[in-house]
Image (spheres, grey):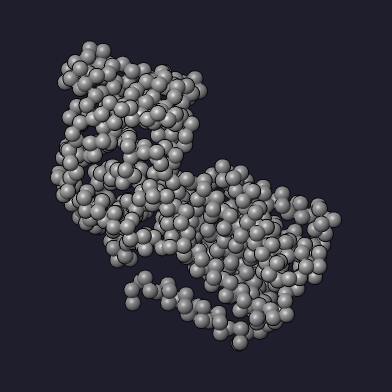
Amino acid sequence: MKRGFIIPCLAGLALLAAVIAPFFISTFTLTIATNAIVFAIFAVSLNLILGYAGLPSLGHAAFFGCGAYAIGLLAQSGIHNFVIELVAAILGSALLGFVLGPILLRTRAIYFLMATLAVGEVMRNLATSWRTVTNGDDGLYGIKLPGYLADGRHFYFFLLAALVVVVTVIAMLMCAPFGHTLRAVRDNRSRASILGIRPLTLEMSAFVISAAVAGFAGAMFAYAKGFVSPGVLSVETSADVLLMVVLGGPATLLGPVAGAVVIEAIRGIGSTYTNRWLTILGLLAVVVALEPQRYFGRRSRKTPAVSASAEAGSESKAAELPAMSLERRHPPALRRGSSARIAIRAAGVAKHFGGFSVLNGISLNVVEGERRGLIGPNGAGKTTFLNILSGITQPNDGRVHFGDRDITSLPPFERAKLGIGRTFQIGNLFEDCTVRENIVLGLLARDGHSLHFARALSRYNELQNEASQLLDEWGLRDLERVPVKVLAYGQRRLIEIVLAVSQRPKVLLLDEPAAGLSGNETKVIIQTISALDPQLSLIIVEHDMDLVFSVCDSVTVIANGRVLAEGTGDQVRRDKSVIEAYLGMPL
């Protein structure tokens, strides 16, 4: 049996066992199973932001408790309509996520963890101290299920069906463009932003959905217990569900469910045999803590486009990959000239970091179709200048215009939408994705599909066909199923250019495209750049003078944060000040 069928088969058997079990187990065991399903739903909600978005939370109980308290407060008010209570719990938690998200999502990694911890504790203290509303530590009682769910077995089956629905919805989201771009933001936020993806919007969407599902789980917990107290908002509750997700496996569909079942089995069954069952949970926590990178850092995933056998032998396959061809299979038409219309303009751009001045009034005009080289000594400020043009860094002074529009204050994703593409000095791709998936992500961002939630990415036929055409055009078809991280360095540099070109930019910023390449690989890059669309404007930062003088129409030399010289290649290479400051001898 193929490996890809093992997990679905095991999941099917587990579901079948879950359906049959209530007819053969005691009431006590049924209660444990019911709690396990409630916490499985809660764990799946946390996994959406922890596993798929890379946001570790120690305050997710805030949304769980919000849903539980919504049920308790409505019950105290005499409202016992199950549908109204459920809608209030879900919407209340979603609204809380919507309010807190823009604040919490400004932080990253450990800071996000601490911020969510603080939110959870504030919520718990509020529930404890606001006695006139929440009844303090005594909690809220009188929570009842409707008659058709009052039977424990019926409620169990309702929860099981709800868990199946929640897992199915998460699976649908992860197969849709939303899921692919969310994981791209998790793995490489800066590259995703340069492609035109709005990281905060994606994370906010995931955060609100996660909060809503957690609120539903909290409501079910309140119904299962018949009361709600501040304990549902505690850091212990958040830590428990975090342990469930990490134990089962972040960024896996069914891992959090398995983790919840294990933890609740230890909690429920273990407590009947020993008073030290918490020690077992503690040992599990220690084991998890020995590998913190699983949830505090980027988690490597298995890409769906790569078969298990191919993935297992990816490293050996990398050694067999052919070197880059010196000719593209279907190169586009060669450049035919340029216009006089300004494509991008920088005026008096200055940048300093503390007391260190990097750029001192750089001005630059690049017209449509022009290839402009940007050269100078190391530390001259060339990459900082590209960062300002692409929106990664804001200048302290000066303006940047794209055509007639002032874009100085625009973020990178807005500039990408206008038509500014970028490659980086250090390889910057989605490492765990295949070559094809990298290209598809670029097309998703370009066409604005990042927030499409329903249709599976594989069903976007036009987009998939365009990705295939790009792979054929650039001679990458043989590598389409290979993870980028196992490719040769030269191939990765080529793919960076292809990824940027897939955006159909009007201005492309290339930061040392030939850095670290062999002579033959540099020739490929030269041919590739020379064969780009003649209407595409280029700004190329490079130390390889053969590339600069063979590709660029004009060259700007930067030294000590200022423009030292500007002109054609012949003019610059014979300029005495350039020879003294950078070249060392005429070329």
Judge by depth and name the residue closer to the eye, 99 or 524: 99
Residue 379 appears in the picture as rendered: no
Q: Residue 425 vs residue 189: left or right?
A: left
Question: Residue 337: x percent and y percent?
Answer: 20, 31
Q: Quadrant of residue 23?
A: bottom right
Residue 204 appears in the picture as rendered: yes
Question: Residue 74: x percent and y percent?
Answer: 77, 64
Question: Residue 515: x percent and y percent?
Answer: 26, 35
Residue lying furthest bottom: 24
Rendered view: 537 above or below 108: above
Q: Residue at x 28, y 45 (%)?
A: 498
Q: Residue at x 33, y 73 (%)?
A: 2
Question: Residue 161: x percent and y percent?
Answer: 57, 75
Q: Residue 568 vs residue 6: left or right?
A: left
The quadrant of the picture occupied by the C terminus is: top left
Judge by depth and name the residue closer to the eye, 3 or 94: 94
Q: Quadrant of residue 547?
A: top left
